[in-house]
């Protein structure tokens, strides 16, 4: 084992010589001898000894205690005081320097050797514990899931960085706060500070998992729905919650691990959905092309512009682009530019400093900063004022902005997806929209067809909506009658998919049995059905034999069969509804 080196700090030469002789005889290496605190600091810096033997009263402006304090702050070197003074004041000052030993003069060789060995051993143990603590802290902070430690009264004692980022909170503000208040539990928010004691807490899975851990039950995993605590940008998260017990300094605590499985749950749901892509239902050629475009651009960081009438599902397309790409682990932040007054939109997009305007009582991050690393979806981009168009253009060009009332330039890495139901090219021509901004945003245009132009998808979309409504109603099974399907196929759907969804929701409520009939539909659809009902003779030119032959030649493609027969798709669907045996055979 290599010899341990010791620096002697002593202003009396004969004492220093005696100590040096004793240490050499005991097998230690002498790193040097100095007479002042200033020299001690310099020698520690230059030689990095294993230990410092420090007299308290020294020459120079720094005494031994002050020098020891600076050594402790700057270097990982233990200090042992050697002094003839043992008064109360000296002892109290010496404690501040956190020495590894204290030897009173005169001392024996045994006292010197024992104190030094214990100091070296204690320092080695402390260093090992510090390294272990640093490693555990790195694991805690670097874990790819939210971890928090809570007490029996549901108060937060410790959280990791992932938790702070996930819920957008500040550690100083939430420590000793109630967990329900922090994660945005609706029951807790209405009664701050009473998390875990309210009537609604008995069914809370966070409460159940915490109680199970504190009661000594085996670690358990549960799934729960938690909303982001930031009410302005709240979204439903599906979290897997694991809990385990921890006892620290006589207190029973629970470790809660929250793993975000929102995307995994969504993926499983998508895998079970037929004829859909990323939550978008459709099987027409136009929709297949859109699905292909989404896949192609998902991992390419270029702006995309989703065009289409209101209600066609533009936000679904934007969400699909985000979730299919490498940014899916980061935030997707939607902003409806048309719903926010222009004087507030700048603050919404870029944030503001405290005191920037009346009511700005705290610093606030903007949507661009919240979307850093992810995607921002600017809906109704055509409603931006000229002033906001200029500010947005700068962010796209430089990737930087300043908060309202601030001077600090903030850089962000954000993918921008826009949507509008306006003809932006016409808006550019008449001067309402900047040409340079248009070309910046419309790198990849995606045009969603109105529902009336993809009428073949109506049955698929209707089934998808019915299944969703059934699930929300606790599994109640309801289907569409053939007469209702006829109405849907004949209707022009000016409100597109949103109108179809609202119509089905209305009918779902009105229907008390298991089949939705025309009388359950909203009045506007019932009226449209009566107006559009064709006379009976309109169908006489179509026969079962002709239809079956056309379907056979078209390999079952109903749209192609309708073209061969010279009838509309709606007419073909009505004939099939009246002759269900043909549909079964085809």
Image: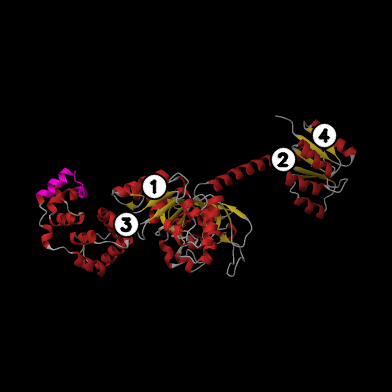
Between tags 2 and 3, which lies in front? 3
Residue at the outermost top position:
1
Label 4 packing within 10 angstroms: few (<14), some (14-19), many (20+): some
First along the sequence among labels 2 and 4 = 4
Left-right relation of 287 to 582:
right
> Gap in Å between the C-alphas at discs 2 and 3?
82 Å
Query: Residue 536 placed where, x, y %?
Result: 11, 62
First along the sequence among labels 3 and 1 = 1
Between tags 3 and 4, which lies in front? 3
First along the sequence among labels 2 and 3 = 2
Badge 4 is on which residue? 22
Label 1 packing within 10 angstroms: few (<14), some (14-19), many (20+): many
Label 2 packing within 10 angstroms: few (<14), some (14-19), many (20+): few
Comparing 110 with 341, the one in front is: 341
Between tags 4 and 1, which lies in front? 1
Between tags 1 and 2, which lies in front? 1
Query: Residue 386 placed where, x, y %?
Result: 51, 61
> Gap in Å between the C-alphas at discs 2 and 4?
17 Å
Label 3 packing within 10 angstroms: few (<14), some (14-19), many (20+): many
Badge 3 is on which residue? 450
Q: Is residue 309 above or below residue 66?
A: below
For numbered disc 2, what is the local secondary structure? Answer: helix
> Gap in Å between the C-alphas at discs 3 and 1?
18 Å
> Gap in Å between the C-alphas at discs 3 and 4?
95 Å
Query: Residue 170 placed where, x, y %?
Result: 57, 58
For numbered disc 3, what is the local secondary structure? Answer: loop
Q: Label 4 near label 2: C-beta < 8 Å?
A: no
Task: Please state the extent of the stretch shown in magenta in the rendering.
Answer: 545-560
First along the sequence among labels 1 and 2 = 2
Residue 294, disc: 1
């Amino acid at each position: 084992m290599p010899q341990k080196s010791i620096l002697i700090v002593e202003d009396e030469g004969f004492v220093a010589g005696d100590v040096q002789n004793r240490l050499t005889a005991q097998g230690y290496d002498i790193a040097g001898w100095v007479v002042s605190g200033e020299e001690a600091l310099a020698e520690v810096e230059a030689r990095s000894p294993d230990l410092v033997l420090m007299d308290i009263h020294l020459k120079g402006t720094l005494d031994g205690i002050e020098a020891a304090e600076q050594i402790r702050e700057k270097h990982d070197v233990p200090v042992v005081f050697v002094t003839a003074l043992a008064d109360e004041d000296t002892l109290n000052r010496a404690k501040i320097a956190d020495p590894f030993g204290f030897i009173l003069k005169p001392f024996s060789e045994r006292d010197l050797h024992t104190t030094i060995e214990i100091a070296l051993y204690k320092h080695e143990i402390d260093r090992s514990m510090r390294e272990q603590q640093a490693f555990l802290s790195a694991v805690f902070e670097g874990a790819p899931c939210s971890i928090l430690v809570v007490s029996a009264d549901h108060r937060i004692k410790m959280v990791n960085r992932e938790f702070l980022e996930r819920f957008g909170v500040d550690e100083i503000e939430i420590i000793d706060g109630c967990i329900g208040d922090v994660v945005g539990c609706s029951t807790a928010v209405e009664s701050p500070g009473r998390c875990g004691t309210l009537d609604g807490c008995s069914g809370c899975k966070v409460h159940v998992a915490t109680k199970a851990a504190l009661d000594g039950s085996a670690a358990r995993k549960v799934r729960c729905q938690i909303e982001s605590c930031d009410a302005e940008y709240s979204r439903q998260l599906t979290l897997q919650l694991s809990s385990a017990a921890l006892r620290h300094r006589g207190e029973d605590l629970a470790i809660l691990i929250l793993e975000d499985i929102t995307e995994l749950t969504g993926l499983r749901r998508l895998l079970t959905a037929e004829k859909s892509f990323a939550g978008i239902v459709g099987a027409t050629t136009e929709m297949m092309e859109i699905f292909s475009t989404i896949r192609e651009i998902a991992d390419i960081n270029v702006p995309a512009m989703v065009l289409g009438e209101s209600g066609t599902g533009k936000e679904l397309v934007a969400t699909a682009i985000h979730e299919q790409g490498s940014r899916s682990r980061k935030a997707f932040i939607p902003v409806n530019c048309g719903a926010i007054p222009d004087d507030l939109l700048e603050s919404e997009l870029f944030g503001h400093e405290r005191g920037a305007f009346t009511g700005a009582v705290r610093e606030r991050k903007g949507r661009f900063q919240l979307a850093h690393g992810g995607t921002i979806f600017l809906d109704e981009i055509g409603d931006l004022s000229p002033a906001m168009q200029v500010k947005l253009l700068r962010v796209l060009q430089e990737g930087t902005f300043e908060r309202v009332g601030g001077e600090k330039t903030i850089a962000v890495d954000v993918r921008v997806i826009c949507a509008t139901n306006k003809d932006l090219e016409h808006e550019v021509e008449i001067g309402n929209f900047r040409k340079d901004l248009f070309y910046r945003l419309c790198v990849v245009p995606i045009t969603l067809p109105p529902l009336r132009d993809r009428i073949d998808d109506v049955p698929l979309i209707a089934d998808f909506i019915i299944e969703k409504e059934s699930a929300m109603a606790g599994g109640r099974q309801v289907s569409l009658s053939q007469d209702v399907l006829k109405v849907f196929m004949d209707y022009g759907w000016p409100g597109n998919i949103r109108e179809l969804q609202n119509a089905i929701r209305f009918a779902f409520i009105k229907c008390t049995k298991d089949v939705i009939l025309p009388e359950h539909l909203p009045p506007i659809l019932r009226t449209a059905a009566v107006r559009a009902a064709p006379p009976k003779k309109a169908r006489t030119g179509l026969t079962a034999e002709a239809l079956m032959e056309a379907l056979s030649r078209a390999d079952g493609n109903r749209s192609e069969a309708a073209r061969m027969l010279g009838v509309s798709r709606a007419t073909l669907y009505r004939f099939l509804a009246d002759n269900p045996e043909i549909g079964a055979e085809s």
